[in-house]
Each structure stands twice: as structure tokens, then as C-alpha cells.
Amino acid sequence: MVRTAGASTSAGPTLAVVAREAGVSVPTASKVVNGREDVAPETRRRVAEALDRLGYVRRPRYDPTRAPRLVDLVMHSLESSWSGAVLHGAEEAAYDAGLEVVVSAGLDRSRTGPQEKPRPERDRLDRLLVRGSSGVLFSLAELTAAQYAWLEHHRVPFVMIDPAVEPPPGVVSVGAANWQGGVTATEHLLRLGHERIAVVAGERHRLCSSARVAGYRSALAAAGVHHRPEYVRHAGFDRAAARRRMRELLDLPVPPTAVFACSDAMALGVYEALAERDMTVPADMSVVGFDDLPEARWVTPALTTVRQPLSEMAATALRLLLRMMDGHHPESTRTELSTRLVERASTAPPRTAGGSAGEG
């Protein structure tokens, strides 16, 4: 969290503010706070009065033998709005708890690319011990059995935020109600009169993606709408891949009239594919996303999407980690926060009733 030098904080005024109030230098005010004797009595009196008047909180002296209480936040990536929302929630909760957060990207077996030399798992994890971290938050991680074993062996408390795959029994995790989010998105399109509804999903094995697709299918079944297997396309949460999958959907003999994209980033890829065909949203195609990132509001037309509370998920995970660091294991290992639909301008009824009918 960025603090401006000399400004007041929620913990009270800074020493610079006290010094200015007393009409002395910051080093002189510091001497008074720390009980130094080389200060004139009148100067000491003015500083003491300013301290009391402003409610200055005397912080404990720095003890070089006592390391600050650190937690690690290991992100899948640091390059997206998704990651920014998670980081914001974790940092705010850590600040309230008096913790320091060390942020890094990696520790995920899926990150190795053609230009990236894989680093040994143990080398990555050993850094946690070297810097004295009290616990770890893993965001969108897919840890190996060896990594789980290392954490267990070293008794490092950790919590998973939106784990990529189902974690082992006993592992504490926080996520969103993804299945319900898929139901909500699909029901919204059904209420508008759409029946030819496609879904552009993430990786097949990803926990959140499979849950959202399951919710989509459940909503169709509950409405008595025939499920078309060709309407389910996987794009790996990648915008460019989503654009390609949308082109494939448009080339079907009976294309959809609406699309549920399982992330806002993929929804933007859907928008791009439609623009290539001179099709407009929502007149030619209704689109629903998932996440409610800032991009959902910036795109034209603004994207109807399912909001998952990313910052709240991270803050909840941090608070659970704090309890685990204090020796309390949560009664429930899985915490799910609710999702909700945010209606904007990207959805509308299909052009004609006949166009929405379940042909074939």
C-alpha cells in the first residue's frame, strides 16, 4: 500500500506531522519519541504536547532479531486484471492484520514455456523458508504431489484461491460458486427467449471451467432445451482462442443466437470474432461473460457478466490463513462465495421467435 511521506494514516499522524505541529525537525521529534536526553526541556515539552494533541501512536522500536510476519502470495500470473483484483483483496486484508505480503508468479507446472527453463520445485519452495514466511496463498495454482508433500513436511500453512484442479483432501481452499454462476448466466439468456445458446469454456480439466459448463447444461435441462454438443467449445481462458472458437460456432449449419463465455477475457475474443463478420452485439448475438473485470465495463457495448468476488475471495483466504498460522484449522476445507449476474448492454432477445427455436 502506497503511503505519502508526511501524511496521516488510519493509524494516526506520522512523525513528520508531529514535528511540523511542534515547530521542530523530524530528527528532533524522533529523539523525544525514543527518550533521548539531548533535547532542550522546552523543545521536549512542545513535542510531547503535539504528540498528545494529535494522538500519535508510538510504534515499537525495530528489533533486528525479530523478523516481520510475512505471508507469500503466489500468483499464476501478474499480467491480468483478474490477478490485480486478487492482489488487492489479499493486500487489504494483510494490512488490516499487520502482515507483510511477498508477491511472486510461478510455482505452477503449467507455466513452463518454450523460452522458460523450468526451475526445480524445491528451489522455488525453499525460498519461503529462507525469507521466513509464516504461510502461503496460492492463486489459480495446480501443485504437484511433490509440492504438497514439501508443504506438509515443513508444516507451512497454506490456502488455495480458486485452485485449478480439485485439491487433495484436507487442503483449505476458497472459490466462487461457479456452478451457480453458469446456471445464472444461462437462465438469463433463456429468459430473453434464446434457446440456441453456446458456451465458450476454459480448459476441460480446470475446476472452475467444468463447474460453469455443468451449470450451463443444468439450466438448459431444467428449461427443457435440447443440449447441442457442438455448442460447447473450449478455449483455455485465452482471448485469441476464444475468437477462433467463436468463428467455428458461426460456421455451424445452425449457429447459436447467444454465447456464454466463461471469462470476460474470452468474451472479448467473442466480440472480435463477431466484428470480423460485421455482426453486432446484442442485435445479432447476445454475449454473457464471467468475472466482472474492469474490461467488462469498458468494452462497447458494456458486457453483461457474472460477477465473482475476486477481492473478497482473496481476503477470505488471507483471514483463513491467519487462523491456520495461529494453530486453528478451519472446520470446512472449502469456502464458496456467491456469484451474481450484472446486467449491462450485451444481451437482448433474439431477432425473431423463429430464430430462437431449437431447430433439429
Image (cartoon, rainbow, N blue to C red):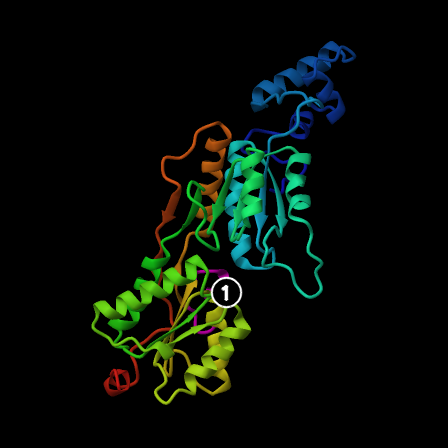
**Which image quadrant is residue 342 in?**
bottom left
Residue 123 % position (x, y): 69, 44
Mark 1 is surrounded, within 10 Å at the Cα level, by few (under 14), some (14 to 19) or many (20 or more) other residues, namely some
358 sits to left or right of 278: left
Nearer to us in this view, 109 or 198 = 109
Q: Residue furthest bottom?
A: 253
Residue 236 % position (x, y): 50, 67
Q: Residue at x 45, y 83 (%)?
A: 248
33 sits to left or right of 75: right
Q: Verify whether residue 298 appears in magenta.
A: yes
Q: Is residue 6 visible?
A: no
Residue 58 % position (x, y): 61, 21
Residue bounds of the magenta highlight: 291-303
Is 56 rendered above or below residue 102?
above
Q: Residue at x 60, y 55 (%)?
A: 78
The residue that mark 1 highlights is: 295
Residue 319 % position (x, y): 46, 37
Secondary structure beneath dot 1 equals: helix
Nearer to us in this view, 348 or 210 = 210
Q: Is residue 331 visible?
A: yes
Q: Quadrant of the C terminus?
A: bottom left
Is 325 rendered above or below residue 266?
above
What amino acid type should be assigned to the residue bearing mark 1?
Glu
